[in-house]
Amino acid sequence: MNQLDKAREKINAIDVQMRELFEQRMKAVEEVAEYKLKNNMKIFDPDREAEVIEKNSIKMQNEKLKPYYREYIQAVMDISKSYQESIVNCDTYGYQGVLGAFSHIATQRLFPHGKMKNYAAFEGAVKGVLNHEIAKAVLPFENSYTGEVGEILDLLFKYDVVIQSIYDLKINQNLLGLKGATLCDIKQVYSKDQAINQCQDFLKNFDYELIPYANTALAAKFVSESQDKSKAAIASIETAELYGLEVLAENINTSKDNTTRFVVVGNELPEDGNHLSIVFTVHHESGQLAKIMQIVAKYGFNMENIKSRSLKDASWQYYFYMEIEGHYRDEKMQSMLEECRNSSSNFKVIGVYNH
């Protein structure tokens, strides 16, 4: 056995010990997290972390290794915090917007006994899942009338989060105003651009100024705080109750089957489901997309949906989103996915769910 083999043998033996010690340490971390949860304590204690790093670094005998050891201990502490976050926030669910937003309503219906955390942007909610601030995020994915929410698809392509389930929420839009206001008083209507588009048949009967707003609930909040009877918002009845507004016209959306599909996004793929979603790119050559579609057909699976989205960092190039009916754990499905992976780039399964 040469010197290299002997050194590697030592490292392998030490790695076994470190793995066993790591498991013991994480078990203790779990007990710390449970105590903090029970006593409503914060996960991150900067004074304690600095003390642990300093105390352990001082005891290092090899000065040359001390800075590397500090980095190692810091990494261990970061892993510990991440694991504690996942335990403490296991029943916390995130959404974009404010109280009364349709995302809030969907989250409340999906997890009626859970804690909720709101984010200003969709990306913030996705990062909240990645950082274990929340267990899952509930995000609007597609509306039956106005189509997909492209930003969500872009985030699923960009980040390592996955769709774990879907939920369809029937959307009833309403015109909300201050108490005592009438349709004739209204001059400006505020709402999310998609909500305005969903109500065009109603709105064309009036000479209202239509003003896009960040979301429906924020629009309602703005109208409520303005105390101006000439302003109205398009939002839900729940939002009217929340901000003390009056329903001036009920169920004004053009399509009476107006439904928004929400996706529940988490960190890990479920064990199985009867539908799955994939994203991928293909070489900029003729027939490459058709090749992927032919692979799906060859294995006998039903492709329910396919969309293209432009790549943000590459002009005139696209990635593709595809929904496929079939069980993820099925052997034939796994063979099909492997063949698709080998015939494309940036391939990943971004969702496994029942539908």
Image: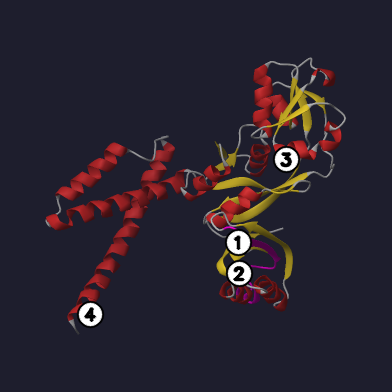
Q: Which residue is mark 3?
A: 194
The residue pinned by badge 4 equals: 5
Give the side of residue 1 with respect to residue 302, left or right. Answer: left
Callouts 3 and 2 close, C-beta under 8 Å:
no
Query: Disc 1 marks which residue?
Result: 317
Which mark is first along the chain, 2 or 3?
Answer: 3
Q: Is residue 330 magenta?
A: yes
> What separation in Å lies between label 3 and label 2 (alpha carbons)?
33 Å
Horizontal arrangement in the rendering, residue 121 relative to residue 186 (left or right): left
Q: Amino acid at mark 4?
A: Asp
Q: CA distance from mark 2 to mark 4?
A: 46 Å
For the residues bearing labels 1 and 2, Cβ distance under 8 angstroms: yes
Q: State the mark number for residue 184.
A: none
Mark 3 lies on a secondary structure that is: helix
Eye-nearest disc, 4 or 3: 3
In the image, residue 143 sits, relative to residue 16, either above or below, namely above
- Label ID, residue 284: 2
Q: Name which residue type carries label 3.
A: Gln
- Residue 48 visible in this rendered orientation of the protein: yes
Per the image, label 1 sits on a secondary structure element best described as loop
Image quarter for residue 21? bottom left
Which residue is farthest front?
A: 315
